[in-house]
Image (cartoon, coloured by chain):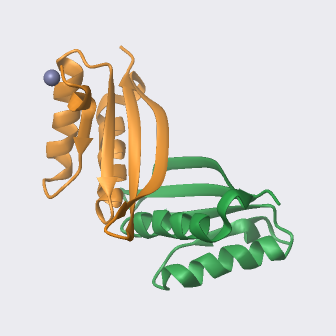
Chain colours: A green, B orange
Amino acid sequence: AAPADNVVVIGKKSVPDYVLEVILKFNEGIDEVVIKGRGQMISKAVDVYNALKSKLGDSLQLVSVNIDSDNIGGRLVSYIEIRVRRTI
Amino acid sequence: AAPADNVVVIGKKSVPDYVLEVILKFNEGIDEVVIKGRGQMISKAVDVYNALKSKLGDSLQLVSVNIDSDNIGGRLVSYIEIRVRRTI
Ligand SMILES: [Zn+2]
């Protein structure tokens, strides 16, 4: 698998769609998945994390939350990277 | 000071307004400030953190980032709590 295969970038699809994408990655054998959201998609990334936690319960572990910004054409664009692991 | 005096809750004001609120708290002698955003305000909370980091540079330390949800009338509302400290 390519290095970025463990990243789910949040966009216009629904929260349940992204929850499913993360679960499919776990089912492919990827042990840690990064949920990444930029700009206004940061809020939805946290929604995806919370919906995933509701669905998986104790088998979901929050590994880390990284917040920072990318300089895109001289403009700072905030992002969040939520790293999760399925433990069982 | 009351216990919640170190929390800045993000709402409709501008990012620079909230950056100033955090700096004013530091100047009052509060050493750690929590930037809290709920729902769509999560993205703006991260913008406030990044703008604050641009302004304060190495004197700003990111202590922790907490993501979770509150059950408000049976509905899960996501939130973020960004804890920062001024080190010098
Ligand atoms: Zn007080």
- Quarter of the image with the N terminus of chain B is top left
Above or below — where is B35 with respect to A6?
Answer: above
Viewer-nearest residue: B7 or A76: B7
Does A87 sit left or right of A56 as displayed?
right
Q: Look at 75% across and 79% down and name the residue there.
A: A24
Above or below — where is B29 with respect to A2?
Answer: above
Picture quadrant of residue B20: top left
- Decide if residue B65 is in sight here: yes
Residue A9 placed where, x, y %?
57, 72
Picture quadrant of residue B88: top left
Q: Look at 23% across and 15% down and name the residue there.
A: B29
Q: Quadrant of ligand 1?
A: top left
Does A63 sit left or right of A86 as displayed?
left
Viewer-nearest residue: A25 or A6: A25
Residue B37 placed where, x, y %?
31, 53
Residue B57 placed where, x, y %?
38, 29
Q: Look at 23% across and 40% down and name the residue there.
A: B8
Residue B52 placed where, x, y %?
30, 38
Picture quadrant of residue A18: bottom right
Does A16 sit left or right of B39 as displayed?
right
Viewer-nearest residue: B52 or A47: A47
Does A50 sit left or right of A5 as displayed?
left
Q: Look at 32% across and 58% down and name the residue there.
A: B38
- Decide if residue A70 is in sight here: no
